[in-house]
Image (spheres, grey):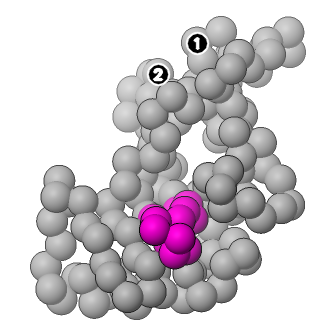
Amino acid sequence: MNPDWTPPNGYGLTKKAKWAPSQKPYAFDLSTFRVRSSWSSTIDAVWPGRKNGVLTVTIGEFGLSPHPLSGAETLPEMIAAADLRYGGKWRAQWNGADLLVNPSHPVSFKDQAALVARLDPMLAAFPLVPVGFDGWYYR
């Protein structure tokens, strides 16, 4: 990474040992890092939120398109230099009672049950980072 580069506003995530769901922290499944092109990569992510005052967990994909001047090459460098203007692309959101699925990622009834079985323990364990994920990363 370019040692003289400082992330401008809207770029870069920093890992912090705190819990502040209102600041939309992300946790990443590092094993899902995928290079899409020379300037774009993705990684699976979860993030907490609040909807109508109820804590939610959202699962989706986070785009890691580092700032071109950052010189980022490794996954930690790409996270530190990520373009944050677009956030994560959500697939599903769970609040403990209702599963909301993104229409662009349809899920069968059988797969909905598996998705709830995966998300429910994450929601119940907040503020702990979900098992298999690395976090919390903040803007």
Residue 100 quadrant: bottom left
Label 1 secondary element = loop
Q: Position of residue 111 (x, y in %)?
A: 22, 82
Q: Earlier in the sequence, mark 2 or mark 1?
A: 2
Task: Please indicate whether residue 49 sits to the left or right of residue 114 in the image.
Answer: right
Q: Amino acid at mark 2?
A: Trp
Q: CA distance from mark 2 to mark 1?
A: 8 Å
Task: Tell me the crowding category of disc 1: few under 14, some 14 to 19, or many 20 or more residues within 10 angstroms, Cα based.
Answer: few
Look at the picture and state if 66 lies above or below 117.
Answer: above
Q: Which residue is mark 2?
A: 39
Q: Which residues are magenta?
A: 46-58
Residue kind at label 1, given as amino acid type:
Pro
Magenta segment includes 73? no
Can residue 16 be seen from the camera position used here?
Answer: yes
Above or below residue 6? Residue 134 is below
Q: Secondary structure at mark 2?
A: loop
Q: Could you say which disc has been placed on residue 68 in the image?
A: 1
Q: Is any atom of residue 57 visible in this view? A: no
